[in-house]
Amino acid sequence: MSEIEFLNWVRGQGFQIAVIIFIAGVIIRLAEILLLGRKANLAEAKGSEMSSGLRTIITRSVPDKSTFQRSTFTVVAGYIFHIGLFVTIFLFAPHILMFKDVIGFGWPSLPTPVVDALAVVTIIALLAVLTHRMRDTVLKFLTTKEDILVWMLTILPLITGYMAFHRIGMTAPTLLAIHILSVELLLVIFPFTKLMHAFTFVLSRWYNGAISGYRGVES
Amino acid sequence: MSASLEKGVNALKEQVDSTVASFFSSCVHCGMCSEACLFYTETGSPTSTPINKTEPLRRIWKSEYTLLGRIGKMFGLTAKVDDALLAEWETVVYDNCTLCGRCSMVCPMGIDIALLIRKTREGMAAAGHAPEDLIGATRRAVTIGSPMGVKLPALMAQIKHVEKDTGMTIPLDVVGAEYMLLLSSMEIMNFPEFIEATAKIFDKAGVSWTISTEAFEATNSGIQIGVADIAAELVQRIVDAAEKLQVKTVISPECGHAYMAIRWDGPNLVGKPFSFKVRHILEVLDEFRQDGRLKITGKETQRLTYHDPCQISRRGGVIEQPRNLINMFSDNFVEMPDHGKMNWCCGAGGGVSSNERADEVRLKVFQRKKDQLDAIKPDAIISACSNCRIHLEDGLEEYNMDIPLLSLTETLAEHLAD
């Protein structure tokens, strides 16, 4: 397979397979959660489930002061790499062109040098997160193979994307093909790992807020 | 698989619903829950990280209710729940967790970790991996009617004392009374002043109330150990008594888990809505305050603080009422750092105080409460849970701190105007 054939495959069939697994996987995972259902609460309510649940979806993004003081690194590094991932994925001009190609519409981009710089910041943040995970007693204790796999497949598209943009080490088509392939790997494992939190956090925060709000407590 | 393990696994399976599945799907192993838990912050033991306590339930969810987990199970790749795991988790789940729910307030994914631990206990108890002391307390609750073995004659003796001291009559089994008061064994045995205080307040407020001789015990060991059937049976006794006496409101006394059991879990345990209301004593007193039924005289000038019992505040929703009431008789009320819904547990709820094996750790983690108290140096602490009160007294003694403990209801009664 020549490098152009390789690029064409990852852009064509490879991409299709990855997207199908991603979408089908996410739907299956959400269905297997929601179809379980839950029993209606028979206790006399003190507050609304719906509004409390919706509120917690938003408010849980910001920790209370004492929690922030106790988990400063996790919160700050977490914010940085999440924002970094969002910007590099969704606000980078070439990516928006790709989205426009696939879904038919695009949106404004951020200046490329800004995205480029943020990509570096995000890579550094992710490296810091892994270092913290390896050194902190609790995190080391909690960490599973899946955590490491997810970390690797999250940082890989950032690194390959950075290399492709700056043409480091290999020819442009090969670099681009490797970058796209790394994204496809991420899409394929996404539904079957903790990456699903990107969708399920809405459900879990809602349930948390609803359970608490029913008893009259803002959570 | 042994018969008891099978029971445990089945009990865990029954716990899985869409909340459980969304919670486990969302965990990213960030570890922030550890910092919300006094059993971690004061011991530094990573096994006490709240989400770790749910491991048996997580394994059941993963292997039975996820596509990948089910496929993995076919090839023997998905982690299983066995007796060794449950035996290892017994101390994690029962000795090092009070179900205080602070972790549930902190998790950035919104996982209600305390709910998951409560559900994990259902499997642990069914498989026979619950602490001996809790099993004993639960057995006494079912057979005798009280986890501490308090029978009706003991209550009657205390009531006789109160009647002699006050000259009042404690209304028993009064049909059609507005309120039916429940008591915890702890109150009957250690704090009969609570009965006296309540009687005085209700008399002044001019409301009709009663105690049922058939169902006076408010505590629910089934909730603590995690056996829904037993919890339901204990709730049903109260429901039957309340319906027989046709009361409008059942009052949960100064006890944390009792309120959770009867107010929030009760109807769900027995499977139908109650025909009466359930209120915590502090909610009732605050209603009296709003209606102008409480006439207070004299102010406490000493520096008072309020310890929020977890199941009453954070998990129960009774947060403002105690503050409204304290401000009626106090000029010098100070809040601890992290008060209200973010208060730190005393360290002995959720069955921990009934479990002798946990005595050492509950006193160790009291350091958290000590730090909170050191920050404001109060002259006295008010609480609204006998269990918190007993343990706070224990902890203060252990750490050589001389701060008296007061019951809110009792202190309020002392300030009633004649």
Image (tube, coloured by chain):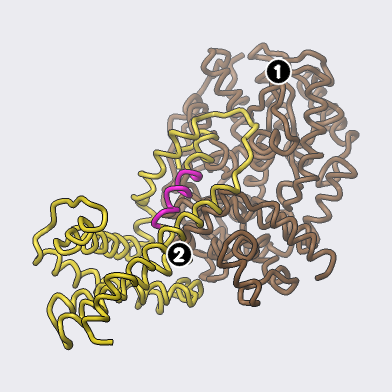
Chain colours: A yellow, B brown
* Chain ID of residue with mark 1: B
Note whether A187 is above or below A170 in the view shown. above
Element type at mark 2:
helix
Q: Kindly report which numbered mark, 1 or 2, lies closer to the viewer in this rendering.
A: 2
Quadrant of the snapshot with the N terminus of chain B: bottom right
Could you tell whether B179 is left or right of B18 in the image? Answer: right
Name which quarter of the figure residue B412 lies in. top right
Give amino acid for label 2.
Lys
Note whether A74 is above or below B182 in the view shown. below
B401 or B381: nearer the viewer: B381
Which disc is residue B248 wearing? 1
* Chain ID of residue with mark 2: A
Note whether B368 is above or below B251 in the view shown. below
Look at the image and give the residue range highlighted in magenta. Answer: A198-208
B158 or A33: nearer the viewer: A33
Residue A198 at x, y percent in the picture: 39, 57
